[in-house]
């Protein structure tokens, strides 16, 4: 199926989509994305636009897509480098996956104030960047971490517990959905989200 397209709520979303589509490669896309001001609130409070991490060479084995940068990510300009990132790295390693061979992105590239959930207009405006990133990376397998990311790929009525554990074909890619590492931290090392996240990573590793 085709990825559900967030509503085009304003001219800013259309302008981002047009600008992103013109980027011929990752470096060009990153350059224009870092100066994005499509979301005035986010642009005025961020320190960095967190474009994402990609393998130094070659096509990524897996594209990992989270929700939005947190405080540490905003400070460093890199995705998943705080507590959630440390747990993600640990569980990737336990599953036999090397983060260096993965692309790590977010659906929204700027930190929302106080780590609130991104608003619908913010997701819509930032979608052009992510769509072009997925095109440029051309990876066959994508992992959506958390409900916001799951809804971006599978639609607004997505229930995470009902769609995890199996791939969903979206725009020719195998999209897997699982819990965000922050949920695994919140419910503790013996909680269901961590167990599910670890199990899903192991399953995905077995398909690559």
Image: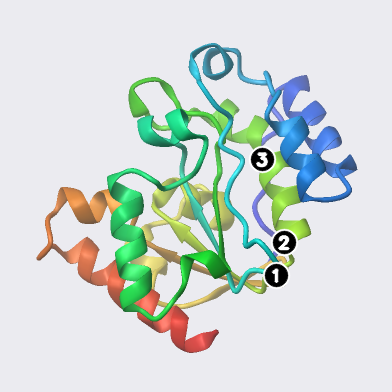
Structural distance between the alpha carbons of marks 1 and 3 = 21 Å
Does 127 sit above or below residue 135? above
Which mark is on residue 14? none
Q: Is residue 61 left or right of residue 36?
A: left
Structural distance between the alpha carbons of marks 3 and 2 = 15 Å
Q: Residues within 10 Å of mark 3 (few under 14, many from 20)?
A: many
Look at mark 2 in the image and give the residue it sits on: 137
Structural distance between the alpha carbons of marks 2 and 1 = 6 Å
Name which residue lies at 12% across and 56% down. 188
**Circles 3 and 2 in contact, beta carbons < 8 Å:** no
Look at mark 1 in the image and give the residue it sits on: 59
Q: Secondary structure at mark 2?
A: helix
> Disc 2 or 1, which lies upstream in sequence?
1
**Circles 2 and 1 in contact, beta carbons < 8 Å:** yes
Residue 184 drawn at (x, y percent): 22, 56
Residue situated in front as seen by the camera: 9 or 191: 191
Q: Is residue 166 left or right of residue 198?
A: right
Look at mark 3 in the image and give the residue it sits on: 127
Residue 66 drawn at (x, y percent): 47, 50
Q: Secondary structure at mark 1?
A: loop
Tell which tag, 2 or 1, sits nearer the viewer.
1
Kindly tell me whether residue 27 is visible in this rendering: yes
Quadrant location, the C terminus: bottom right
Residue situated in front as seen by the camera: 187 or 137: 137
Quadrant location, the N terminus: bottom right
> Disc 1 or 3, which lies upstream in sequence?
1
Residue situated in front as seen by the camera: 150 or 62: 62
Q: Which residue of the protein is positioned furthest toward the front in this rendering?
A: 56
Name which residue lies at 73% across and 28% down. 13
Q: Secondary structure at mark 3?
A: helix
């Amino acid at each position: 199926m085709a990825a559900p397209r967030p509503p085009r709520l304003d001219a800013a979303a259309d302008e981002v989509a047009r600008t992103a589509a013109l980027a011929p490669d990752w470096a060009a896309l990153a350059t224009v994305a870092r100066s994005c001001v499509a979301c005035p609130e986010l642009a005025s409070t961020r320190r960095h636009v967190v474009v994402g991490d990609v393998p130094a060479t070659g096509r990524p084995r897996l594209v990992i897509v989270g929700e939005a940068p947190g405080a540490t990510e905003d400070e460093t300009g890199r995705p998943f480098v705080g507590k959630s990132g440390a747990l993600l790295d640990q569980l990737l390693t336990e599953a036999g996956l090397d983060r260096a061979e993965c692309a790590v992105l977010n659906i929204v590239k700027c930190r929302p104030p106080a780590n609130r959930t991104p608003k619908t207009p913010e997701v819509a405006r930032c979608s052009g960047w992510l769509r072009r990133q997925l095109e440029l990376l051309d990876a066959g397998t994508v992992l959506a971490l958390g409900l916001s990311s799951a809804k971006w790929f599978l639609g607004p009525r997505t229930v995470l517990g009902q769609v995890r554990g199996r791939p969903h074909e979206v725009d020719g890619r195998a999209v897997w959905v699982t819990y965000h590492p922050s949920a695994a931290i919140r419910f503790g090392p013996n909680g269901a989200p961590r167990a599910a996240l670890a199990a899903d990573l192991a399953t995905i590793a077995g398909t690559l």
